Image (cartoon, grey):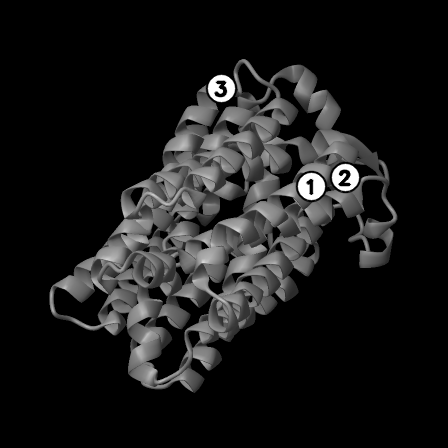
Amino acid sequence: MVNLLLAIIYISFISLGLPDSLLGAAWPSIYGEFGVPVSFAGIVSMIIALGTIVSSLQSDRLTKWLGTGKVTAISVALTAAALFGFSVSNSFLMLCLWAIPYGLGAGSVDASLNNYVALHYKSRHMSWLHCMWGIGASAGPYIMGFALSGGRSWNMGYCYIGIIQIVLTAILFLSLPLWKNRNAQTEEIDSVDIIENEKEIDGSKTRGEGFSKPLTLKEIIRIPGAKQAMIMFFCYCGLEQTAGLWASSYLVIHNGISASKAANLASLFFIGITVGRALSGFLTMKLNDTKMIKLGQFIIALGIVTMLLPLGSTVSMIGLVLIGLGCAPIYPCIIHSTPKRFGADKSQAIIGVQMASAYVGTCLAPPFFGLIADHINVMWLPVYLFVILVVMFLMHKEY
């Protein structure tokens, strides 16, 4: 039963990744069809991010009320409905309206699942599970590219992903009984980790769900190290989402390749994340979370430098892959270290605000670069990513 639930969680992470890269892959086709500026991609991503911020901040309360399994199943169902809404959209306004449930469906499931895995599984599983996210995120642009190159519209790309999400939703609802026996999951954690993760709250032991009172935002921010963790997540997701959203447009506008080809090539960034997280799972057996985060930051810097070299689209693509490889260990390793850093009784609340901060970064960083692309030039993408990386590095030193 333990292995079956772990397989369900792996599937859930694939479902998280599938929609995340679709907007960036489809946008070169969308903005021309709707007659809006290229920077309007930032508006849609901002609405999605606002929804995820709201639901992430409620994840502690929702998880304690419904449990991780129900939160996951309901959230994926909501995302599936939003994807079908995108597939029938015929105006920019409709995209914006469907972006609301799109975002609301993502936040709670992200925070709840990440906390569950951080509490009940070893670091390698966190990396491999986020590798599953990368598989989903890498598959999204390929599916969109398939729709575009086959003479179909970008709407069909969203429809295909919506169908996949419906199937995943059915699997998640059927798996709900597996989530009830949480104690079975501790087999994946060493006994010393269980002792570190357990806290006494009102006379009852908890691993993040059930008994403890939800913390307020003010209480969370006052916890030492919480603000640095929030800024780190702001920077990380701002960097990742900016690179993912604008990679296709960068390759089309700066390197002069076609929109359909760019949609496929943009997936190289997510392939870099996916491969990197598969490798990170093995590296975590030798390196701790802090060393893995530093390694990731170094590789991102190397990828940015590569993109700055004036050597054509091939070198730009290599840079994107390196940035993806560098991104790979950072997110899962910060999440996995949260219960030990802050305590299991606070981990769901902390991860909730980390997710919210991450989506604030998603909300602000990509559209701000959209203004730069509109009014200056999209070629400034690598420089923009480097500035975000420097801030993230400084916050990690204080963390």
First reached walking from the N terminus: tag 2 or tag 1:
1
Give the residue furthest to the left: 150
The residues tagged by marks 3 and 1 sit, at their Cα atoms, a distance apart of: 27 Å
Badge 2 vs badge 3, beta-carbon distance below 8 Å: no
Disc 2 target residue: 345
Q: Which residue is drawn at 48% across and 36% down?
A: 328
Residue 246, x across and y down, in percent: 42, 59
Give the residue furthest to the top: 286
Query: Residue 163, located in which quarter of the rendered image?
Result: bottom left
Q: Is residue 388 above or below residue 187?
A: below
Disc 1 target residue: 208
Task: Identify which residue, 164 or 86, lies in the foreground.
Answer: 86
Q: Is residue 60 above or below residue 347?
A: below
Label 2: which secondary element? helix
Residue 287, x across and y down, in percent: 57, 17
Q: Residue at x 56, y 53 (%)?
A: 384
First reached walking from the N terminus: tag 2 or tag 3:
3
Mark in the foreground, 2 or 3: 3
Image quarter hosting the N terminus: top left
First reached walking from the N terminus: tag 3 or tag 1:
1
Left or right of 5, for residue 219: right
Q: Which residue is drawn at 62% across and 53% down?
A: 358
Badge 2 vs badge 1, beta-carbon distance below 8 Å: yes
Label 1: which secondary element? loop
At label 1, which amino acid type do we have?
Gly
At label 2, which amino acid type do we have?
Asp
Residue 181, x across and y down, in percent: 55, 37
The residues tagged by marks 2 and 1 sit, at their Cα atoms, a distance apart of: 6 Å
At label 3, which amino acid type do we have?
Leu
Label for residue 283?
Answer: 3
- Which class describes the residues within 10 Å of circle 3: few (<14), some (14-19), or many (20+)? some
